[in-house]
Image (cartoon, rainbow, N blue to C red):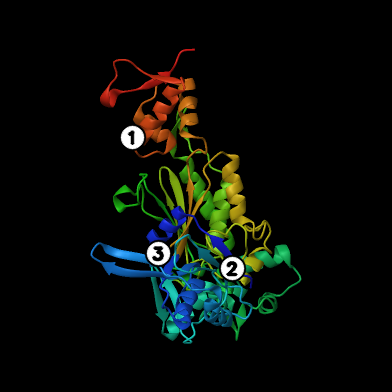
Amino acid sequence: MPVSLRKITQEQFNALLAVDESHFVDLKGGDITPANLTKTASAFCNTSGGEVFVGIDESIGLFGKQRTWNGFPDQESANPFFQVLERMSPLGNHYEAEFLQADGANGYVLHLTFFKTQDILTASSGKVHVRRSSQNLPVDSDEAIERLKYEKGIKSFEDDVTNTPLNGISNSLVLLDFLLEVVPSSEPEEWLTKQRVVHDGRPTVAGVLLYSDLPQAVLPKRSAIKILRYQTKEAGERDFLVFDPLTVEGPLYSLIYDAVEKCRQIVEGIKKLGPNGLEPVVYPQEALHEVLTNAVLHRDYSIPADVQVRIFDNRLEIESPGRLPGHVTVANITKTQFARNPKVVRLINKFKEPPNKDVGEGLRTTFEAMDKLRLKEPLIEEREASVVVILRHESLGSPEQLVMEYLIKNPEITNSIARELTGIKSENVMKQVFYRLRDTGQIEQIPGRAAHKAAWRRKPA
């Protein structure tokens, strides 16, 4: 693998010495051994990827934490590190490397970028590590290794065998209707066996999810969708719940469509401030459909938790149990594919009008749908044991544009109304928007209105 040399500026040099170590960044002193470096490599590759800078010493002095540049005397001195890193993966494609050089600095710092891998990588010691905050933690127990296999998608819970009898899915209404519509020449048990959702006369998790009339009776707390409506824009607290949480149940096909319809009804009841006063929230149904479909089909079913939909006054959050599988990260999720539950994804696509019509295009479709309605693009967050997609009821227009659109149909605007329109939380930040519009001659402050009664209007032509 070619390793480039990059000369950094004084500003970049200072920023590197001041960088905070985190879940994605680690600094290592010049005295680290190649074997110890593989612990960090294992942790990053087994979690979400990250960067390591080798050759930054750290000490505690009178003025607190101090860092110094203490790089390799020459590039060949780093060869032992490359040798152990290459041995971690057969193809050696789990990382990239470059040397950094700065004027007046001692030697070359090795900058390593590690990528999240589909497989589990071990350190030189043979131990597996994961990254948690700024720590590399060993994965010691067999149970923890199994948990990591589910997280990375190496092993899928969809293939686990349930204790329910075969006739729980072979005689179900959902399966009989499906066979009549799609493969009328097949017998239930023969078809289920051919699709490998039956093992030793027992249905697998995938079989139950798809073809049981009520999977939640067999797989409680891991196969339903909870919908919560909070009458607030802040974090959800029980005091702000509009009604008791709704639980949507049923086989995956109807579960998705029923949950989308229920969410649509709730969202359409929300009003937001617009140029014409209170207006219903306009929301692309395909965006909600695609995010919910992904949350159900690609979740980690080994985690005993339901998919949650939390509807706020200004956003909608969909939380799917399980971290991103395989090589998928927040950065590449719209550009890559990886099915944690490939049987579920493949078999639900055989239904008429399948929820996953364009396999692998879900979140990309969501981004496009939000953009068409000039809404801000979705936010994707990977948390400790889940993935959350946030759809915001906020316009893509600039704050200045939203203020001027409001003043076309309204005689004046206050700071509080403007913050409601734009989603800006700070009163002072909103003032700066007004000042920019004032300085360009577009608006003026209404005379005689000060303090909390202050308001702005369009400047006469």
C-alpha separation, residue under disc 2 versus residue under disc 3: 41 Å
Tag shown at residue 376: none
- Please say if 251 is above or below 126: above
Q: What's the residue type where badge 2 is placed?
A: Leu
Q: Position of residue 24 (x, y in %)?
A: 45, 65
Tag shown at residue 428: 1
Locate the N terminus and report the quarter of the image it occupies. Answer: bottom right
Residue bearing mark 3? 22
Which class describes the residues within 10 Å of circle 3: few (<14), some (14-19), or many (20+)? some
Tag shown at residue 210: 2
Which class describes the residues within 10 Å of circle 1: few (<14), some (14-19), or many (20+)? few
Q: Nearer the viewer, residue 196 or 64?
A: 64
Q: Is residue 239 left or right of residue 330?
A: left
Q: What's the residue type where badge 1 is placed?
A: Asn
Q: Position of residue 210 (x, y in %)?
A: 59, 68
Q: Are marks 2 and 1 in contact (CB under 8 Å)?
A: no
Q: For the point 36% across and 49% down, which residue is it?
A: 243
C-alpha separation, residue under disc 2 versus residue under disc 1: 53 Å
Mark 2 against mark 3, which lies toward the viewer? 3
Q: Is residue 278 visible?
A: yes
The mark that comes first in sequence, 2 or 3, is 3
Q: What's the residue type where badge 3 is placed?
A: Ser
Which class describes the residues within 10 Å of circle 2: few (<14), some (14-19), or many (20+)? many
Q: Nearer the viewer, residue 69 or 296?
A: 69
Q: For the point 34% across and 49% down, which residue is it?
A: 241
- Please say if 281 is above or below 88: above
Secondary structure beneath dot 2 equals helix
C-alpha separation, residue under disc 1 versus residue under disc 3: 31 Å
Mark 1 against mark 3, which lies toward the viewer? 3
Q: Is residue 385 visible?
A: no
The mark that comes first in sequence, 2 or 1, is 2
Secondary structure beneath dot 1 equals helix
